Amino acid sequence: MDLLIDYLSRRYRRVVEVGMGTYSRVACALQDLGLTVTATDINPRTEGVPVVRDDLWEPRLEIYLEAQAIYAIRPPPELLPPLKELAGRLAVDLIVKPLAGEPCDGQLVSTGGSFFYVYPAGRSGREKLRESSIP
Amino acid sequence: MQEKAEAGIIWLETLRKEDIPLVGGKNANLGELSGVIGAPVPPGFAVTGRLFREFMDEAGLSDRVREILHGLDTADMHTLQQVSGEIRRMIEETPIPGPLEIQVLEAYDELVRRCGKDEVLVAVRSSATAEDLPGASFAGQQDTFLNVVRRDLLDRVRACWSSLFTPRAISYRQEKGFRHDDVLLSVAVMEMVQARSSGVTFTIEPVTGERNKVIVTAAWGLGEAVVSGRVTPDEYMVAKDSLEILERFVAAKKEKCVRRREGDTAYVPVPEDLQAVPAVTDEEIIRLTEEAKRIERHYGVPQDIEWAIDGEGRLFILQARPETVHGREGAKEVTKMEAAAGPEILLRGLGVSPGQGSGPVKILIDAKEIHRVSKGDVLVTEMTTPDWVPVMKISAAIVTNSGGKTCHAAIVSRELGIPCVVGTTNATQMLAAVPEVTVDGATGLIYRGILARRAEDAAPAAVAAAVAAPPVTATKVYVNLSIPEIARKVAVETQADGVGLLRAEHLMLSVGKHPRLLIEEGGGGLMVDKFAAGIREVAEAFAPRPVVYRFLDFKPDEFLEIPGGEKYERPHVGPNPMIGYRGQYRYMKEDDIFRLELTAIRRVRQEFGLTNVWVMVPFVQALWVFRETVRIMREEGLDNRTDPDFQLWIMVEVPSSVLLIDEFCREGIDGISFGTNDLTMLMLGVDRNDASVQELYDERNLAVLRAIAYCITICRKHGVTTSICGQAPSVYPDYLEFLIRCGSTSISVNPDTVVASRKMVAALERKIQMEQVVGGAIRPRVAKIPMDELFFWRKVE
């Protein structure tokens, strides 16, 4: 997850982790690095990070309005379409770290055996991605 | 950004999506359209929400508004209208403090300079910071003023601001849970396009949700005619890929909206010889489609786009926003009510929001009468405007005299999920003496009397029955699932033939602990309970259709971070976890964990009687390991040889299982499913998670196709079912054709692609059948490779 933490912390100041579940390591690490992190889950059950109850199928947009990017860690593949849709509508980057072997059609970022996928928000997002050096 | 946050005026081309909080969705979108996408947007500027806030605060209006709205019951239509009037008057009659006023007028003067004219007529449009956001498009929620001259500019800006407090806007914010204080109003000031023709383009068929079509609607004059629904526009359906114009409907456009010399707008008759002439040329339709595709590509979701073409043939994009219904939910099967012989059809129109609604007829001529509508009435009117929204929400169905697929009534009713028929011409007269009607928003028919209930009011079983029967296909279309909670919804909405892949990994993640740790803590039973509950939920939702449960396919590195993972997985993390300690090999090495899964399966099948649950073994490499796996299964009472209702499948994702497929068939498997991700990776020796070799990763590589063709052929010989649970068939249509031609018995795809995949399967099967009838002489290809080249083994000897 260090690659993901590094990637997010270098690019964004305000992010939302969608569907946090019970795993809060990335969000906590980002908070420690000074990012404003909000997490959502349909059934909040984690401490250490503010987790807001939200249903990705019917997201409450006010939660996400300030975010520069949203990300999801090991989301079930069924959640990819609503995640992409949410990011598209907010026009923010989406970063997905899927379980290995599960389908994900974003832009692959990998190094040192770690990987995740990025769905950049439009052309400006893609340019940012190209310009940045992958750590 | 800091600078922008402080600004009262920002030029459109410098705005980006991130600026929504400052200038609202409409302005930010215009900025994105012109500055990033390069779409032809008329020049203009945004009066920011901050400037509005300063006006409200400095004039002392904020506190008064808050007091007035406190405790307001929006269901009380009469009070709502009163309160709205009071607030609007306050805003419209309070002068704008001098420094703020100067900022707006100076920006206008700069716009005039930029346009190189003496005077510029502008469109003044509101841009609320919550409007146009996902799930909340609400066409025309705030106001738009056209052909505004300098002396009227400030009044119009104030009128836009006050439109934040129309009854519909107040009621809408309560409904969507926005605080009145949080929603600021920005205003867009743009040069007017002197439109010869205008319209709306949808990058999705707005009624059926088909994403491969673009719908262009067009009428003469200003776009207000189309958006308001007053004029029924021409409508063209264009194929998104080939740009072929598939359907044309040229309406008799008797009126058009034009700018009057006085500066305001009016409807004037269209000369008779022009009424039936298309408002756009074919070339313009293609240009509009291409522009719309570009915009959709940028945003990644279907869009509805307002545009205008001026007298010189120049195209301008005036607004683009997400299409709010299908863009949110994915295409749904359209439910149509059988036009049975019994019910009397009173009227026909254009069905624009599927579903059926019945109720007492309430004919309204003017928005002032909206208090007459009660919950459950069928609202019948000439055409709705944003003022009607509060009563549209409580109506059982909506019928209008005019309008097309993209008019206000159509857009809002789709968003609200209320059946709607538009363009009936004379519903307000025809239904005047009819007490009750039933409206079918899919077929556009209006029947006498109460015949239907709204789908969501019906019992779940009735919902399933009401969903239009999908086309019957010989190739089964299964769905891939990993979240049991959505199984029922997916089963009803997709009408899939079963679950071709139920993943176990997310069940394990939801348990939240490493299974070894659970066992160590004496909590093995918890895992069995959780798994059994999840599998049962899916099996019940789909019964009697099969559910193929794939056993856990742990990769050690993926589970390091759950409690217990570090202790029990770390020793197994090798240099390449994708070909390390995973799949069925683990069942043999740690059979106690495997037996917990088997216990859960047995419980669901035997205790709950859900014998539609079958199993699939992942990452099968060697025969001897497979035999060991089967032995353990039999010890746990799961034996596909003796139980006619139980099937055992294997995943084919390792080259050894391809070359040994005949051996596996002889072991008595009932089915196989290709995992094309791993199969491609291992056939080609390319790590799909390594960006540096992505170019080599190709599911349509000849080697992969040959492997699949070979397996299907052998399996057919042994009567073994074949399926695929990778994404390739839903991404590449020729891949699907290849599988069907090879004789694959099913495919399994993600929930959002089941309906479309089934349609494609049906079409391909028909095509293949027809070829057989007429002796088709084509050489089918996949990824340009002639299919006969795939059956390599036939040429070996």
Image: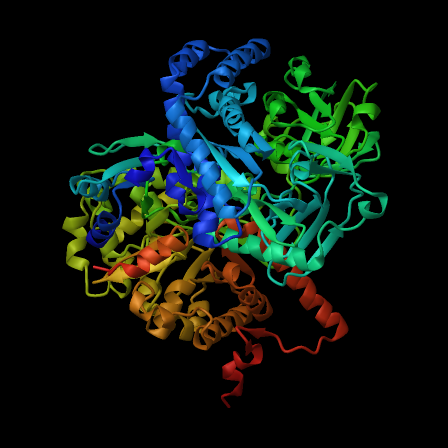
Q: Can residue B41 be seen here?
A: yes
Q: Is residue B101 left or right of residue B509?
A: right
Quadrant in the rendering for residue B376:
top right
Foreground residue, B648 or B352? B352
Q: Position of residue B753 (x, y in %)?
A: 53, 52
Foreground residue, B28 or B555? B28
Q: Residue at x 78, y 23 (%)?
A: B449
Foreground residue, B551 or A10? A10
Q: Position of residue B368 (x, y in %)?
A: 66, 16
Q: Residue at x 65, y 15 (%)?
A: B374
Q: Is residue B767 left or right of residue B518?
A: right
Q: Is residue A49 left or right of residue B330?
A: left
Q: Can residue B610 be seen here?
A: no
Foreground residue, B23 or B353? B23
Q: Is residue B685 above or below residue B87?
A: below
Q: Position of residue A112 (x, y in %)?
A: 20, 63
Quadrant in the rendering for residue B462:
top right
Q: Position of residue A105 (x, y in %)?
A: 41, 57
Q: Is residue B457 left or right of residue B603?
A: right
